C-alpha cells in the first residue's frame, strides 16, 4: 500500500461550502476504492492523508492535483510498502479544526500553520524538479541516477565583478535578483527549468525536444535586458548577459552529501554549456549554441556560423552558432563594457 500526506490552500474563489461537497464525494468515492485517510482544514489550509492500494492512491492523487478548488499543493511525505493503515475506519474523515475550540486543539492548529509556512519557504529554496517529484507522490531521494537527453542552459551577468566591487551590497543584490528573475520567468515560460543559481549564474535545462523553446527563452531574456537598458537607469542600463546552450546526454540524479543534496545534471554537455557562456565574452554575440541544438530546431532561425572552437575539457573542437537578431548582437567587447559600467555607476553616483 501507499500513503501520501500533502498540504494545500483553499482557492480564493472557492466557497467554504465546497468543503462539505468535497467531504461527501470523498467519503463516497473512497469507500469504493478502499482508500482511507483524514482531511483537516484550518483557516484556508488543507492537510490530507490518503492511504490505500498504490494504483488507487495514485489515481486519486492525480485527480486531487488538478482540482481547482485548492492551490499550492505540496506533498510532504510519500510512503511505499505501507502494511498497516493509520485510519482503517475513515473513508475520509473531514475535520474543521476552526470549529474545535478545545484548548488541546490550539497547538495542533498552530503546528499545522507553522509546518505549512516553513514548507512554503523551503519550497522557494528547492529546485522545481524536486518539488515536481514530490508532488507526483515520489521520494526524490529514491530516484536512481539515469541518462537523459537535455538542452543545457548557462548564463551569467557580464563583468559582474565590477558591479560587486563598486556597488553597495543592497544594489548588488537588487541587480542580481532582477537578472535572476528575468531569466527564471522566461526559462519557465518556455518550458525549461532552473536547476540552480550559482552567484549571478543560472544553470537550467530544457527537454531535448524543445530546442526552439530554449532559443525563444534566450531571446526573450536578451530582449528584456535590452528594454531594461533602454530605460537608462543605472546600473540596469549596463546589465548584459552571455548565454550558452548545449544538447546531449547527461546524467540526471541526486548529487551531493548527506548534509546537502542537489537533484541536478552532470556530464560533458553541462561543461560545454558553461564554456560556451564563457566564450560569449570574446565573441560579438550574447548567445552561443552547439550544432546539436541547431540540429534539433524546427523553426526557421537566422543562424550565424561561428566556426569551430576548442573548449577546455573537450578533445574535439566544437562547431558553434548564434542567431542573427539585434538583441543577440553585442555592442561592446569586455574592455568597452568595463568602461561603460564604470561610467554609468559614476554618473549615477552609485560608486
Ligand atoms: C482538498 C481536497 C481533497 C480531496 N480529497 C478527495 C478524496 O479523498 N477522495 C476523492 O474521491 N476526492 C477527493 N477530492 C475531490 C477530487 O479532487 C475530485 O473532485 C473527485 O474525486 C471527483 O470525483 P468524481 O470523479 O466522482 O467526479 C478532494 C478535493 C480537494 C480539493
Image (cartoon, rainbow, N blue to C red):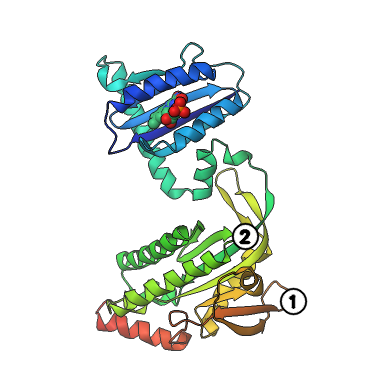
Q: Residue 299: x, y in percent? A: 55, 71
Left or right relative to 278: residue 6? left
Residue 184, position as x, y percentages in the image: 43, 60
Viewed as shown, does residue 183 lie left or right of 258?
left
Name the spot of residue 250 as percent of width and height, x first: 67, 58
Residue visible at 62% across and 60% down in the picture = 150
Viewer-nearest of discs 1 and 2: 2
Q: Nearer the viewer, residue 323 or 86?
A: 323
User: Which mark is first along the chain, 2 or 1?
Assistant: 2
Residue 28 point in image, percent of width and height: 45, 17
Q: Residues within 10 Å of mark 2 (few under 14, many from 20)?
A: many
Q: 10 Å neighbourhood of mark 1: few (<14), some, or many (≥20)?
A: few
In this picture, is 92 found above or below 124? Answer: above
Tag 1–tag 2 contact (CB < 8 Å): no
Viewer can see residue 86: no
Which SS class for mark 1? loop
Work out which quarter of the rendered image holds the C terminus and state it: bottom left
Residue 276 occupies quadrant:
bottom right
Q: Nearer the viewer, residue 244 or 207?
A: 207
Residue, far top: 89
Residue at x 42% of width, y 88% of height: 336
Identify residue for label 2. 150
Residue 70 placement, left or right of 282: left
What SS does tag 2 mark?
strand
On residue 316, the disc is 1
- State left or right for residue 292 relative to residue 230: right
Residue displayed at 53% across by 22% down: 51
Q: Which residue shows up at 44% across the image and 49% down it?
A: 125
Ligand 1's image quarter is top left
Q: Which mark is residue 83?
A: none
Res 177 visible: yes
Amino acid at each position: 500500500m501507499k500513503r501520501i500526506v500533502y498540504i494545500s490552500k483553499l482557492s480564493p474563489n472557492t466557497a467554504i461550502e465546497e468543503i462539505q461537497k468535497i467531504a461527501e464525494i470523498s467519503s463516497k468515492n473512497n469507500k469504493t476504492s478502499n482508500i482511507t485517510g483524514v482531511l483537516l482544514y484550518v483557516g484556508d489550509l488543507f492537510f490530507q492523508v490518503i492511504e490505500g492500494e498504490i494504483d488507487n492512491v495514485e489515481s486519486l492523487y492525480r485527480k486531487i492535483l488538478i482540482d481547482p478548488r485548492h492551490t499550492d499543493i505540496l506533498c510532504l511525505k510519500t510512503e511505499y510498502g505501507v502494511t498497516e493503515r493509520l485510519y482503517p475506519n475513515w473513508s475520509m474523515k473531514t475535520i474543521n479544526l476552526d470549529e474545535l475550540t478545545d484548548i488541546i486543539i490550539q497547538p495542533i492548529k498552530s503546528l499545522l500553520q507553522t509546518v505549512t509556512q516553513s514548507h512554503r519557504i523551503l519550497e522557494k529554496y528547492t529546485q522545481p524538479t524536486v518539488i515536481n517529484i514530490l508532488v507526483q507522490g515520489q521520494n526524490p531521494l529514491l530516484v536512481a541516477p539515469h541518462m537523459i537527453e537535455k538542452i543545457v542552459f548557462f548564463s551569467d551577468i557580464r563583468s559582474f565583478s565590477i558591479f560587486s566591487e563598486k556597488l553597495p551590497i543592497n544594489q548588488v543584490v537588487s541587480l542580481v535578483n532582477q537578472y535572476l528573475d528575468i531569466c527564471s520567468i522566461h526559462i519557465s515560460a518556455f518550458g525549461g527549468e532552473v536547476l540552480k543559481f550559482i552567484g549571478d549564474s543560472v544553470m537550467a535545462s530544457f527537454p531535448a525536444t524543445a530546442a526552439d523553446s530554449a532559443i525563444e527563452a534566450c531571446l526573450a531574456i536578451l530582449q528584456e535586458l535590452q528594454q531594461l537598458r533602454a530605460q537608462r537607469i543605472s546600473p540596469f542600463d549596463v546589465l548584459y548577459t552571455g548565454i550558452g546552450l548545449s544538447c546531449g546526454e547527461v546524467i540526471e540524479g541526486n548529487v551531493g552529501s548527506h548534509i546537502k543534496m542537489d537533484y541536478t545534471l552532470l556530464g560533458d554537455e553541462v561543461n560545454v554549456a558553461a564554456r560556451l557562456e564563457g566564450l560569449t565574452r570574446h565573441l560579438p554575440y550574447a548567445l552561443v549554441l552547439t550544432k546539436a541544438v541547431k540540429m534539433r530546431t524546427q523553426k526557421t532561425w537566422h543562424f550565424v556560423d561561428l566556426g569551430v572552437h576548442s573548449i577546455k575539457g573537450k578533445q574535439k573542437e566544437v562547431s558553434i552558432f548564434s542567431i542573427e537578431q539585434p538583441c543577440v548582437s553585442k555592442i561592446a567587447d569586455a574592455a568597452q563594457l568595463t568602461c561603460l559600467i564604470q561610467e554609468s555607476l559614476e554618473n549615477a553616483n552609485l560608486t
